[in-house]
Image: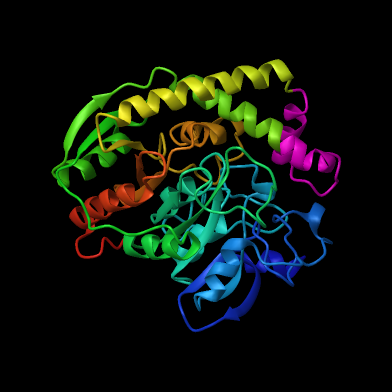
Amino acid sequence: MASLQEAGIFLERMALGGDGARVGIKDSIDIAGFATRMASGCLADSPPAAEHAAVVRALLEAGCRIVGKTNMHELAYGVTGINHWAGTPLNPRAPGRVPGGSSSGSAVAVAARLVDFALGNDTGGSIRLPAACCGVYGLKPTYGRVSRAGVHPRRSSLDCVGPLAREMRMIETAMALIDPTFRPQAATSRAAVGWVEVAANPAVAGAARGALERADLELRSVTLPSFAAAFSAALTIIGSETWAAFGHLAECVQLGSDVRSRLNAARSISAAELAAAEEVRRVFRAEVDVALAEVEALALPTLPDLPLTLAAAGDARAALHSSWCVRPFNLSGHPAISLPVSVEGVPAGLQLVGRSHRDEELCALACGIAGATFGGEGAAR
């Protein structure tokens, strides 16, 4: 186990493919010939995957060079990225703060310039949260837009595979590789964007809104009445689906205490609770669709506060609250992207939410905002 702990960012190094873009692949995504351990000691003896995940196969066919399996929050069931079995990747932009989860290693590998882009998967903010914590870009595509074949857990009504990168153009390049229907569009400006008022640290919300104002967008106030209910419903559904996938590991002695606690709580979710959550999904999805009929995208902070310090990350309630702004859009299924902003040098994020299956338009808007914020190609520092 020492070698995994020393790796931190990568659980396994490799050199697969051609001489194209260097890519890191989250350890929840199958690479043929390598075990998919979900960064869990409970799966340490898993056999090698027999086939590449669909997204891995697409990258290799395009000539990308896969350089390693990236670390993650154990079983993808956490948002801090802290992992006592596989080690916790050091956040290069804020060393005393969490890297975010569950795609922690993917975000850190991008921020540390070890890869050109990385793949993660996002069930409750797991791409957007680490992107915000590490000061990079992270896209959760529309649910169902990118193939999940060969991605764990095998069944999920919330999870999406997507890219993390240091600049928007690389996000678009990565999307075009893993989704052959994706066609990048010219950057857009002067769009109408709906600002969603949510409970958040005023400095963090101000930094996110400030990026929109610098981009000279038309800002309108938007209310999503079922936002809080959607957050809770998404927790119910992810709990039920994670228990179905990994409940058999609840008694594993190597399981992290945070994941064990959440799994044990999830086992008692009732059919009635799940049905109620599905009704909230229907209502909230409709609310978001109605709001997006009037604006090109919705905007709000990615994080409700600055990334948790490593010392504070053991507070389970605080950790879950980190996903307050992002988790509802897993429930609705809309595409959402986090753009880097900062508060006195500490990373935070601006989240944009677009119309379903209009991921290209969302990325074009993000490119325009990134260009106004960072100039040029919108590359974060």
> Which quadrant of the figure contains the N terminus?
bottom right
Q: Is residue 341 visible?
A: no
Residue sitting at x 44%, y 19% = 226
Q: Position of residue 357 (x, y in %)?
A: 41, 44
177 left or right, relative to 340: right
Residue 149 location, quadrant: bottom right
Q: Nearer the viewer, residue 85 or 377?
A: 377
Q: In the picture shown, does residue 380 fall above or below 148?
A: below
In the image, 174: left or right of 185?
Answer: right
Magenta residues, start to end? 242-268
In terms of depth relative to the viewer, which is nearer, 146 or 211?
146
Main SS category, magenta section:
helix
Q: Residue at x 52, y 53 (%)?
A: 146
Res 19 visible: yes
- Count of all numbered marks drawn on residues in the image: 0
Q: Quadrant of the C terminus?
A: bottom left
Q: Which percent across, then down, holds residue 38?
A: 70, 55
Residue at coordinates 27% horizontally, 41% vertically from top-left? 207
User: What residue sits 22% from the left and 53% below the top?
Assistant: 368
Spot occupied by residue 6 in the image (x, y as percentages of width and height): 66, 68
Question: Considering only vertical position in the picture, is 31 above or below 317?
Answer: below
Q: Say if 379 sits above or below 190 in the image.
A: below
Task: Find the residue positioned furthest to the bottom.
Answer: 19
Give 164 or 55, whichever is nearer the viewer.
Answer: 55
Residue closer to the observer: 367 or 261: 367
Percent across and percent down for residue 40 are 74, 53
256 falls in the magenta region = yes
Q: Residue furthest front?
A: 181
Coloration mode: rainbow
Whether 85 is among the magenta residues is no
